[in-house]
Image (cartoon, rainbow, N blue to C red):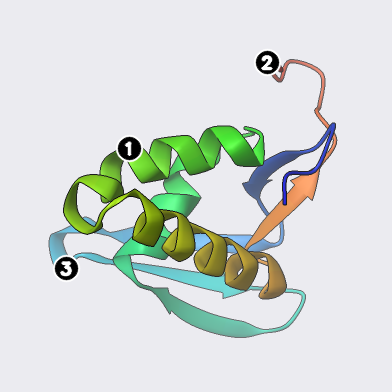
Amino acid sequence: MPYRNTLLRPSPEAVFRRLPEWGRCLVYTAANPEVYELNPSAWLIVELCGAKPDEEVEAEFVSIIGRRVGPAKAREQFSEGLDTLLDLGILERAPPLEGDLVN
């Protein structure tokens, strides 16, 4: 469900270690001390959500992943991945900050 007047962004509490040479992304969450290894879908969601609304991130994700698995499956993967990333504190929904471009 899209949230009005909020943008998706990486949590300021999360520390990312991208290891593209290994095809991996590790994330440390300080609020709940834990290290997570993101799967490729979750990593893509993180990379796409640089202060954008849910529906914009979802559209970009579906345009990329939908070519391989179909749009319906891509939407399902996005929804499940986003929920998990939010629950773990890796991503957050936040009001726009000064300088954020909002459509």
- In the rendered structure, find residue 22 and report the number of the disc placed on it: 3
Cα distance in 3D space between marks 2 and 3: 33 Å
- Residue that mark 1 sits on: 63
Contact? badges 1 and 3 (CB < 8 Å): no
Viewer-side label of 2, 1: 1
Secondary element at tag 1:
helix
Occupied quadrant, residue 38: bottom left
Q: Position of residue 46 (x, y in %)?
A: 49, 52
Secondary element at tag 2:
loop
Q: Earlier in the sequence, mark 1 or mark 3?
A: 3
Q: What type is the residue that disc 1 sits on?
A: Ser
In the rendered view, tell whether residue 102 sits above or below residue 25. Answer: above
Drawn side of residue 94 relative to residue 22, left or right: right
Secondary element at tag 3:
helix
- In the rendered structure, find residue 71 and report the number of the disc placed on it: none
- Residue that mark 2 sits on: 101
Q: Earlier in the sequence, mark 2 or mark 1?
A: 1
Q: Position of residue 8 (x, y in %)?
A: 67, 43
* Residue drawn at (34%, 71%) of the image: 39
Drawn side of residue 83 relative to residue 94, left or right: left
